[in-house]
Image (cartoon, grey):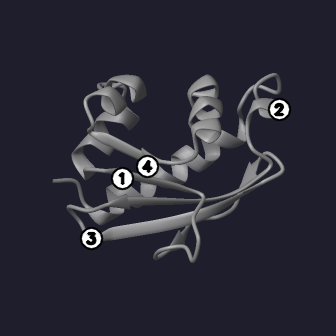
Amino acid sequence: MATTDEVERILLDLITQLQDIDSRYRPMLPSRRTIEASCEDLGLTYHAYWRQGKLSELHQGAADRPDIRIAIHSDDLVDLADGRLRVRDAYVSQRLRVDASMTDLMRLSRAL
């Protein structure tokens, strides 16, 4: 099982990577969303706000009304971050769960 520090580092790295999304993909992404991510095996939940193509800093705890919920086991998150697991493979195998509107799912799949 990954540690809390590893999970936080990976989530912070992902926020940084999302800031660098190619400009041609930005119009595909929603302009305003609240995103919640959890690693249930560690009992961790974080949220951030996507506003006009930028993700805010990471906040600990559940969001009031998240538009997108992501759940993943901590070890799978580490594997995603290290490139040993692809997002689509994790999603198809249900190791990564995403609760979002169909439109948001389509937008995210194009960007990722």
What amino acid is at disc 4? Ile
Mark identifier at residue 27: 2
Q: Callout 2: helix, strand or loop?
A: helix
Residue drawn at 69 percent across, 61 percent down: 56
Q: Which residue is mark 3?
A: 43
Spatial separation of the CA atoms under disc 4 and disc 1: 14 Å
Residue drawn at 83 percent across, 32 percent down: 27
Residue density around tag 1, few if under 14, some if 14–19, many if 20 or more, within 10 Å:
many
Residue density around tag 4, few if under 14, some if 14–19, many if 20 or more, within 10 Å:
some
Q: Which residue is mark 4?
A: 10
Q: Is residue 33 above or below residue 104?
A: below
Q: Are marks 2 and 3 in contact (CB under 8 Å)?
A: no
Spatial separation of the CA atoms under disc 3 and disc 1: 11 Å
Q: Callout 1: helix, strand or loop?
A: strand
Q: Callout 4: helix, strand or loop?
A: helix
Say which quarter of the image contains residue 34. bottom right
Which label sits in the foreground, 2 or 3?
Answer: 2
Q: Quick one: quadrant of the C terminus?
A: top right
What amino acid is at disc 2? Pro
Q: Is residue 57 above or below residue 89?
A: below
- Of the numbered discs 3 and 1, the one sitting upstream in the chain is 3
Residue density around tag 3, few if under 14, some if 14–19, many if 20 or more, within 10 Å:
few
- Front-most of residues 109 and 11: 109
Give left or right: position of 45 versus 60. Answer: left
Callout count: 4
Question: x, y (%) of residue 109?
Answer: 56, 27
Question: x, y (%) of residue 96?
Answer: 34, 41
Say which quarter of the image contains residue 64. bottom right
- Of the numbered discs 4 and 1, the one sitting upstream in the chain is 4
- Of the numbered discs 2 and 3, the one sitting upstream in the chain is 2
Q: Which residue is mark 1?
A: 71
